[in-house]
Image (tube, grey):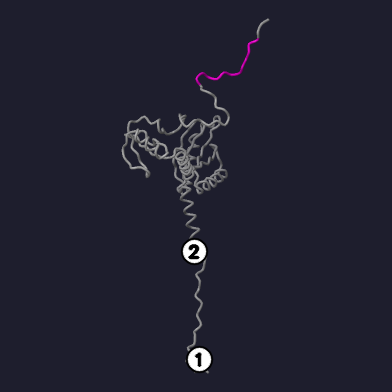
């Protein structure tokens, strides 16, 4: 009777190390994937310490580690390519949190470029052209870029000169609202131009804020001083009596 091969499931790769138990956290020394070298991971013989909590200067690596240990903090290599490498003495987890927070703030402040696409045919009529031109003006006014292209289907590629003229006319009609970043370029079956707004979203928002401030100042009428009643002196009052 033949023995059936026993299948015990997929094998783990050799040298993978012990599998962590559920809820088990990595040990502090296991920092292979960390973006910064710390403490014993720093291989330089001497480092330059910076920061408000130390006397800045060049120190032997052993002394810098000892200073970090005495302060119960970590020695963090923030600029490994400098000569000597630049380090700071900080709480490593707190340092990582601050770096993530800074990156998040930078991403929020960065202006996002929005590209709106408008498609034409090589024989677009005037009604359709004007309709799309109106949309493009709206896109550029709100601070978005406009990518316009003529799509050539089948044998209509023979009319590529007509498509180029159409796109140049489109760019010329939008010169008050946007600038041409890219002349007509044929990419496969599409001829493309790119238009950028004359004002960025940030500039448009600042202009709106200024206009709003002017309206508030101009909308409130100045308070008129009420005429004060003339107070009669005691002598005048006695004379009248």
Q: Magenta stretch containing residue 223, yes or no?
A: no
**Residue 203, visible in the rendered structure:** yes
The N terminus, quarter of image: top right
Residue, disc 1: 237
- The secondary structure that dominates the magenta segment is loop
Select label 1 or label 2 by which is in front.
Answer: 1
Q: Which residue lies furthest to the front in this view?
A: 70
Secondary structure under badge 1? Answer: helix
In the rendered image of this protein, does residue 149 appear above or below residue 234?
A: above
Q: What stretch is highlighted in magenta?
A: 4-15
Q: Earlier in the sequence, mark 1 or mark 2?
A: 2
Secondary structure beneath disc 2?
Answer: helix
Q: Are marks 1 and 2 in contact (CB under 8 Å)?
A: no
Viewer-closest of 132 and 23: 23
Residue at x-position 46% and y-position 50%: 203
Q: Where is residue 46 in the image (x, y as percent from the top left)?
A: 32, 33
Question: Can residue 168 be seen?
Answer: no
Instruction: Classify residue 86 by image quadrant.
Output: top left
Q: From the image, tell me which residue sits under label 2.
A: 217
Please say if 222 is above or below 241. above
């Amino acid at each position: 009777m033949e023995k059936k091969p026993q299948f015990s499931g997929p094998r783990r790769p050799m040298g993978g190390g012990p599998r962590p138990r559920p809820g088990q956290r990595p040990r502090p020394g296991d920092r292979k994937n960390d973006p910064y070298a710390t403490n014993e991971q720093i291989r330089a013989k001497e480092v330059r310490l910076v920061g408000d909590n130390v006397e800045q200067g060049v120190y032997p690596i052993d002394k810098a580690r000892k200073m970090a240990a005495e302060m119960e903090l970590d020695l963090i290599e923030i600029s490994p390519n400098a000569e000597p490498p630049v380090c700071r003495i900080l709480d490593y987890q707190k340092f990582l949190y601050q770096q993530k927070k800074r990156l998040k703030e930078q991403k929020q402040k960065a202006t996002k470029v929005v590209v709106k696409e408008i498609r034409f045919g090589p024989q677009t009529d005037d009604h359709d052209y004007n309709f799309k031109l109106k949309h493009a003006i709206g896109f550029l006014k709100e601070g978005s870029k406009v990518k316009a292209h003529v799509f050539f289907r089948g044998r209509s590629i023979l009319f590529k000169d007509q498509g180029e003229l159409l796109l140049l006319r489109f760019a010329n009609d939008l010169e008050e609202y946007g600038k041409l970043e890219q002349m007509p370029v044929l990419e496969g079956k599409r001829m493309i131009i790119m238009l950028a707004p004359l004002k960025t979203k940030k500039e448009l928002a600042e202009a709106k804020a200024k206009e709003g401030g002017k309206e508030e100042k101009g909308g409130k009428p100045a308070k008129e001083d009420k005429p004060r009643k003339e107070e009669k002196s005691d002598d005048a009052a006695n004379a009248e009596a």
